[in-house]
């Protein structure tokens, strides 16, 4: 059983982190970023060709993390692989020691750096979760028996608490649970009220939810997110204080604001998923500021 | 010609569960050509549905269901029957079903699976598109096609990219699943969103050999009489 699964089942407040593989094979910088998370998070997500930009694979970096003693969360999108490749890669991940899998539909390739490539989407997040469950039970999607079953995989999924309208998101969340999702990491949240409203409707599903936090580095980043990231809204209560300090003081201010946010979110959910986006070095300070101790 | 094939009766009856009063609306174009429509099929369908305990409120054949204006004007004659119906069983390709969905405030149910546009797109007069996925699920989606209206052809609802009702790929483009959500909400059928449709069968993108034999094919091969024979009589 993965440490993530154990911690969540024990009802602990769980912190997870996230790193993005490099474009190329030099993983040193990525591992350096991960090193700031060491001992502070239960597990680290590794993105899968995030934003449809071709990079080093999630699987490769997950394995490197394992070798360095971290627990990875293998992000798998449906954008690039059909059902054969997806199932096969998940089995490969298993034999390499990976247990946590985050199932995502994935962005459309048109948004990335190979815009003309074939969008696969043979499966989507829901059917991918069904595939994982089926593998765990010892059968593939075609119903064929497996020689050895990866029964202790720990599948998770994502949800957007600020989606407008929220209703279809909740319906899909329910479907993901029905399909086997055991935990959720959310899209970035900045407004505790929005999150509370979401949790009021989602807590009945009784599946652990980790609130997503993308560290806001600058007012420009906040504005960019407001304009371009669906279901994410950074309120003035964050943008304004950040724009009032000098560039040099931004990290400090951001940590203060994010810590305040995490404290407000904490009673509402079972953990936070911190996406530092290059600011990994500030994560320990942030966790100290919200009095989140290193996991056991 | 747009090639479509009758859905298995069992699947049809299943899709109509809870819909007791049905109006049958058929296209007089391509489906007649590929024997997924026509008077005979309409009669068969009426018979099968009656046997399943459904009441047939009316039936009609309109020349080209893909022509929404025509559909709208013709359906006007059937308003009383339609008002008493709970759903419309549409005997056409996927475009016809979508066109009817836009013209009536009733759930629509495809009677056929559409395979291919066979090189000719029918009238294709408006925004509806059918990719011939071969496994029509318009009954679940309020008559809006998730294969062509969603940029990723997803089957299980909106992805994380939906923004103000638009698709992540193109801000000018509606998010198909957002439209489906709204339509199902209007129809009081949001529960449909909770259903998980079977995985797509990509073999069905291929047109079955028997259906490749169109009139033109037969003309070219000099087998016009063969082709006009009902299938299964060889
Ligand atoms: S679901 Fe869409 S693509 Fe498939 S047959 Fe129906 S209309 Fe055509
Ligand atoms: S935004 Fe909507 S239409 Fe676009 S890919 Fe996602 S679900 Fe499909």
Image (cartoon, rainbow, N blue to C red):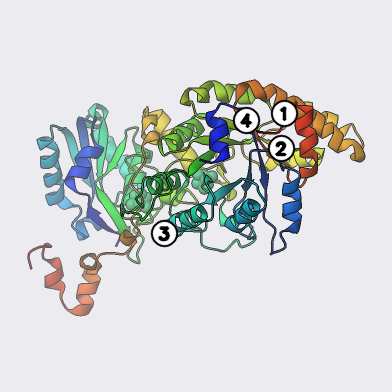
Gap between marks 2 and 4, in whole Å? 13 Å
Residues packed near mark 1 inside 10 Å, few (<14), some (14 to 19) or many (20 plus) = some
In the rendered image, residues at marks 2 and 3 fall on the same chain: yes
Answer yes or no: do the residues labelled 1 and 2 have beta carbons within 8 Å?
A: yes
Mark 2 or mark 4, earlier in chain = 2
Q: Which residue is mark 3?
A: A84
Disc 2 on helix, strand or loop? Answer: loop
The answer to which quarter of the image holds residue B109 is: top left
Answer yes or no: do the residues labelled 2 and 4 have beta carbons within 8 Å?
A: no
* Chain letter for mark 2: A
Can you tell me whether the CB of the residue at mark 1 lies under 8 Å from the nearest atom of ligand 2?
A: no
* Chain letter for mark 1: A
In the rendered image, residues at marks 3 and 4 fall on the same chain: yes
Q: Which residue is mark 1?
A: A292
Residue A206, relative to residue B181: is it above or below? above
Residue A262, relative to residue A50: is it above or below? above
In the rendered image, residues at marks 1 and 2 fall on the same chain: yes
Q: Which marked residue is nearer to the observer: mark 2 or mark 3?
A: 2
Q: State left or right for residue A69 relative to residue A174.
A: right
Gap between marks 3 and 4, in whole Å? 33 Å
Q: Which marked residue is nearer to the observer: mark 4 or mark 1?
A: 1
Question: What is the residue that sits farthest to the left in this orientation?
Answer: B233
Disc 1 on helix, strand or loop? Answer: loop
Residue A40, disc? 2
Gap between marks 4 and 1, in whole Å? 10 Å
In the rendered image, residues at marks 2 and 4 fall on the same chain: yes
């Amino acid at each position: 059983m993965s440490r993530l699964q154990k911690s969540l089942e024990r009802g602990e407040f769980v912190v997870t982190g996230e790193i993005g593989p490099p474009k190329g094979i030099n993983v040193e910088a990525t591992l350096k970023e991960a090193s700031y998370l060491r001992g502070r998070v239960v597990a680290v997500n590794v993105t899968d060709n995030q934003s449809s930009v071709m990079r080093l694979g999630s699987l490769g970096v997950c394995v490197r993390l394992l070798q360095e003693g971290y627990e990875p969360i293998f992000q798998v999108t449906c954008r690039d692989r059909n059902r054969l490749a997806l199932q096969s890669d998940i089995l490969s991940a298993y034999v390499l020691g990976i247990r946590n899998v985050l199932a995502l539909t994935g962005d459309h390739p048109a948004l990335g750096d190979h815009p003309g490539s074939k969008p696969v989407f043979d499966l989507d997040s829901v059917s991918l979760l069904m595939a994982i469950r089926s593998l765990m039970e010892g059968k593939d999607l075609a119903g064929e028996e497996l020689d050895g079953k990866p029964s202790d995989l720990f599948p998770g999924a994502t949800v957007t608490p600020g989606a407008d309208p929220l209703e279809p998101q909740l319906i899909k969340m329910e479907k993901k649970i029905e399909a086997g999702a055991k935990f959720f990491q959310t899209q970035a949240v900045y407004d505790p009220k929005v999150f509370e409203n979401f949790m009021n409707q989602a807590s009945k599903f009784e599946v652990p939810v980790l609130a997503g936090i993308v560290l806001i580095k600058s007012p420009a980043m906040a504005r960019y997110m407001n304009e371009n990231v669906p279901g994410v809204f950074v309120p003035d209560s964050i943008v304004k204080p950040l724009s009032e300090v000098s560039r040099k003081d931004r990290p400090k201010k951001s940590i203060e604001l994010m810590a305040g946010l995490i404290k407000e979110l904490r009673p509402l959910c079972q953990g936070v998923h911190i996406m530092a986006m290059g600011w990994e070095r500030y994560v320990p300070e942030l966790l100290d500021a919200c009095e989140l101790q290193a996991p056991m | 010609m747009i090639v479509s094939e009758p859905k298995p009766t069992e699947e049809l009856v299943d899709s109509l569960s809870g819909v007791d009063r049905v109006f049958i609306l058929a296209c007089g174009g391509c489906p007649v050509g590929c024997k997924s429509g026509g008077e005979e099929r309409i009669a068969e369908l009426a018979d099968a549905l009656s046997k399943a305990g459904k009441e047939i409120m009316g039936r009609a054949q309109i020349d080209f269901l893909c022509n929404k204006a025509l559909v709208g004007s013709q359906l006007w004659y059937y308003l009383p029957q339609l008002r008493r119906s709970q759903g419309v069983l549409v005997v056409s390709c996927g475009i016809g079903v979508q066109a009817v969905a836009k013209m009536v405030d009733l759930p629509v149910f495809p009677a056929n699976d559409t395979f291919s546009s066979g090189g000719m797109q029918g009238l294709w007069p408006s925004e509806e598109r059918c990719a011939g996925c071969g496994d029509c699920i318009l009954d679940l989606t309020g008559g809006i096609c998730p294969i062509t209206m969603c940029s990723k052809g997803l089957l299980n609802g909106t992805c994380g990219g939906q923004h103000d009702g638009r698709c992540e790929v193109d801000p000018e483009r509606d998010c198909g699943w957002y439209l489906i959500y709204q339509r199902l909400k209007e129809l009081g059928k949001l529960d449909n969103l909770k259903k998980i449709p079977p995985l797509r069968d990509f073999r069905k993108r291929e047109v079955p050999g028997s259906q490749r034999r169109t009139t033109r094919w037969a003309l070219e091969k000099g087998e016009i009489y063969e082709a006009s024979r009902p299938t299964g009589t060889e």
